[in-house]
Image (tube, rainbow, N blue to C red):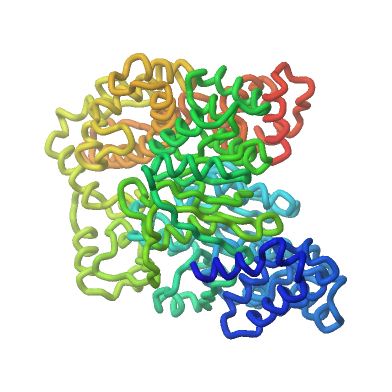
């Protein structure tokens, strides 16, 4: 806090106007001191007020260059030696960008062929290094694994300028001669054509640690992706924030160089406020003072909605966003609070809204049409915005106290290079105490307690722990399920599969009529399957807590499809859902969490198990593949559902379906979308803008 007061005192506007040289003298003393982080912060605070320094800007450029912040330097103000240093930090001779000092060091290490693990602050510019590696066109096949669909979208758009490459984000897309795969770990392990990888990148690598991820299943799948792809990849680049230590085995196995740096290009001011007279009133008092783009962190989608209601009651209607408000009201429901939020320059971003609406909200925020964006970790993890401020409404993730690592991640979202040099973070709780963060990577450390769903993916020569060998020996020798099926069902615990299989073995005749079906199962068959799945493979997630409930929701989707009718049915017939907001979010959550992911994953496992067991007894088996595809695509054409990730909402995609090539693969659909002339379409101006943006970003 004392450093903040010092910076505020030094860089007061009147102080700079009156004594610009004296202010720069103070900055120079800090720069020449022993604290490199403080020196950078002092220069960045000065850059925030650059225009006030007038004729002394060349001195500021000299100080900026001395701390390695070359991107902020005016090249024309440098002397010959500094110009040489500037050129040295450019990726190529005629490049349009310049790296800061430590970016350049990492880039040169990668260009020399080294494997690199980089831990650096959010504002370091880790993804710029990826961009410039791609620009060299030295790599034929690049694989980039990111944790969220939102990050897939952001990276895909950044890669569009690299015309030599085909960008692949979906399972159904075919490879070209030069490819950039941008995938979540789940999509990466689905593909069997990821071979001859020249550069393998894992973003947010701390998620390899099951404890850090908070979701063992996703961490296991990410470890499987690392283990399988890195085996043959020519080069590895792993990046993430605020990690102090990696397992020694990682460096040994992959000959990695670990860069740990606190080099930042944006500074921040952390202000802890009193929640008086209560949290809500203190929050609203703060909001009334804010005129710059602000992210508001909420611990959950439910809290995000509560905050949205607070702000709707507090803020006036503005003269913008009527078009988006009307469109959302028409296509989802006019009573959704998001509609009123748009009219007041507010919206939300979390896992219970559609991907295209999430993309729209980020775009509106970055364009200045939304002043406040209320988000959960779905946005905090990686997606860049123009936020000057971050307000942490409550320092929790769901109902768990926020850890230091998460707090630092959120803090890193305040400020943006060249726009907001100094970000402001406001919290109503004491910040978590600093800790040194380390990360465990089970696919590398391979200890006795490695998750069994990961252990079955490992090569025999990599397993040296005797207890683990014995566990795997049992899985190899048990007779319920072939070991190969465990390997095929990536991320599903083998013990759960064995328990499911043994139940079917014990009741093979009684279960046969419920499990032997193709394409169109009856309600009773789906209900029976769901009961087995809940008994052995899932405890439920989100709003679905029982097999009966899952069957009911599946049947609703089958009858009504995705859209307004589905939402209205939820609102009118679910007694525990009292508001339209909850109905809409429950609908989106079911579609994203269950229809798009959980049901396909669970039924794929059950499909393999029943096929094997009925084959043992020479009984006809079912085939669930068509059912899985139908549910995964919300009983719609698959390509229309995929377009949601390209920023085209399903209601708009349906309107232009006659102009699209469908059912021949996503590549063909994207090609046909590129050829559309939006001006000729019978759609609203707002929808036309959606279509134009989608075309521009494919």
In the image, residue 297 sits, relative to residue 600, either above or below, namely below
Q: Residue at x 44, y 30 (%)?
A: 588
**Image location (x, y in percent) of residue 283:** 45, 43
Q: Is residue 336 left or right of residue 11?
A: left
Q: Residue at x 61, y 35 (%)?
A: 360
> Is residue 438 in view?
no
Percent of width and height locating residue 36: 59, 79
Farthest residue in the left direction?
Answer: 506
Residue 460, how many percent across, how many down? Answer: 33, 69
In this rendering, position of residue 278 left or right of residue 368: left
At 78% from the left edge and 70% from the top edge, which residue is drawn? 92
Quadrant of the rendered structure where residue 178 is?
Answer: bottom right
Answer whether residue 695 is visible to the viewer in this image: yes
Left or right: 473 with respect to 32? Answer: left
Q: Can you say which quadrant of the picture contains the C terminus?
A: top right
Q: How many numbered circles are shown? A: 0
Which one is nearer the viewer's eye here, 563 or 398?
398
Write the residue at 58% across / 75% down: 38
In the image, taking residue 368 as reference, residue 256 lies left or right, namely left
Q: Position of residue 667 (x, y in %)?
A: 64, 38
Q: Quadrant of residue 596?
A: top left
Relative to 503, say whether 456 is above or below.
Answer: below
In this rendering, the answer to whether 198 lies above or below 502 is below
Closer to the camera in the image, 563 or 557: 563
């Amino acid at each position: 806090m004392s450093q903040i007061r010092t910076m505020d005192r030094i860089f007061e506007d009147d102080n700079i106007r009156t004594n610009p040289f004296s202010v720069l003298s103070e900055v120079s003393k800090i720069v020449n001191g022993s604290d490199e982080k403080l020196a950078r912060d002092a220069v960045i605070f000065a850059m925030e007020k650059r225009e006030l320094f007038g004729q002394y800007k060349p001195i500021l450029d000299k100080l900026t260059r001395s701390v390695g912040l070359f991107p902020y330097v005016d090249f024309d103000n440098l002397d010959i030696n500094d110009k040489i240093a500037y050129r040295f930090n450019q990726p190529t001779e005629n490049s349009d960008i310049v790296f800061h000092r430590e970016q350049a060091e990492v880039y040169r290490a990668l260009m020399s062929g080294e494997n690199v693990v980089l831990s650096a602050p959010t504002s370091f510019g880790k993804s710029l290094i990826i961009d410039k590696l791609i620009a060299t066109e030295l790599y034929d096949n690049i694989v980039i694994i990111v944790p969220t669909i939102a990050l897939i979208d952001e990276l895909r758009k950044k890669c569009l300028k690299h015309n030599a490459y085909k960008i692949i984000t979906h399972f159904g897309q075919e490879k070209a001669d030069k490819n950039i795969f941008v995938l979540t770990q789940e999509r990466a392990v689905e593909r069997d054509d990821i071979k001859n990888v020249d550069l393998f990148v894992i973003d947010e690598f701390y998620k390899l640690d099951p404890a850090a991820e908070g979701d063992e299943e996703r961490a296991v799948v990410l470890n499987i992706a690392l283990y399988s792809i890195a085996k043959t990849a020519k080069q590895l680049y792993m990046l993430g924030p605020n990690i102090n230590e990696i397992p020694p085995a990682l460096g040994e196995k992959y000959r990695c160089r670990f860069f740990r740096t606190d080099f930042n290009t944006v500074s921040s001011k952390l202000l802890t406020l009193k929640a008086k007279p209560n949290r809500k009133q203190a929050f609203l008092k703060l909001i009334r003072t804010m005129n710059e783009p602000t992210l508001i962190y909420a611990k959950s989608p439910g809290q995000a909605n509560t905050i949205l209601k607070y702000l709707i009651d507090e803020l006036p209607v503005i003269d913008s966003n009527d078009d988006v408000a009307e469109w959302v009201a028409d296509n989802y429901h006019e009573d959704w609070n998001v509609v009123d939020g748009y009219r007041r320059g507010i919206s939300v971003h979390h896992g219970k809204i559609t991907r295209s609406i999430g993309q729209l909200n980020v775009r509106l925020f970055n364009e200045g049409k939304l002043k406040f964006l209320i988000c959960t970790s779905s946005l905090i993890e990686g997606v860049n915005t123009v936020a000057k401020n971050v307000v942490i409404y409550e320092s929790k993730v769901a109902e768990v106290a926020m850890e230091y690592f998460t707090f630092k991640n959120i803090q890193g979202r305040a400020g943006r290079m060249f726009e907001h040099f100094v970000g402001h973070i406001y919290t109503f709780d004491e910040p978590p105490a600093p800790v040194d963060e380390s990360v465990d990577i089970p696919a590398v450390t391979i200890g006795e307690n490695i998750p069994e769903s990961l252990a079955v993916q490992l090569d025999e020569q990599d397993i040296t722990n005797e207890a683990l060998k014995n566990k795997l020996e049992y899985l190899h020798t048990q007779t319920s399920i072939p070991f190969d099926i465990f390997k095929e069902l990536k991320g599903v615990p083998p013990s759960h599969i064995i328990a499911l299989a043994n139940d079917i073995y014990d009741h093979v005749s009684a279960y046969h009529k419920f499990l032997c079906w193709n394409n169109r199962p009856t309600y009773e068959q789906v209900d029976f399957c769901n009961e087995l799945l809940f008994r052995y493979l899932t405890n439920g997630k989100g709003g679905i807590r029982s097999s009966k409930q899952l069957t009911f929701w599946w049947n609703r989707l089958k009858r009504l499809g995705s859209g307004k009718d589905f939402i209205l049915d939820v609102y009118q017939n679910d007694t525990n859902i009292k508001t339209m907001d909850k109905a809409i979010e429950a609908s989106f959550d079911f579609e994203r969490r269950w229809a798009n992911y959980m049901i396909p994953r669970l039924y794929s496992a059950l499909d393999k198990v029943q096929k094997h067991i009925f084959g043992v007894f020479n009984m006809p088996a079912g085939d669930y593949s068509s059912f899985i595809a139908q549910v995964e695509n919300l009983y719609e054409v698959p390509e229309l559902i995929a377009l949601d990730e390209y920023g085209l909402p399903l209601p708009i995609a349906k309107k232009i379906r006659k102009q699209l090539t469908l059912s021949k693969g996503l590549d063909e659909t994207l090609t046909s979308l590129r050829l559309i002339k939006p001006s000729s379409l019978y759609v609203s101006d707002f929808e036309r803008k959606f279509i134009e943006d989608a075309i521009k970003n494919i």
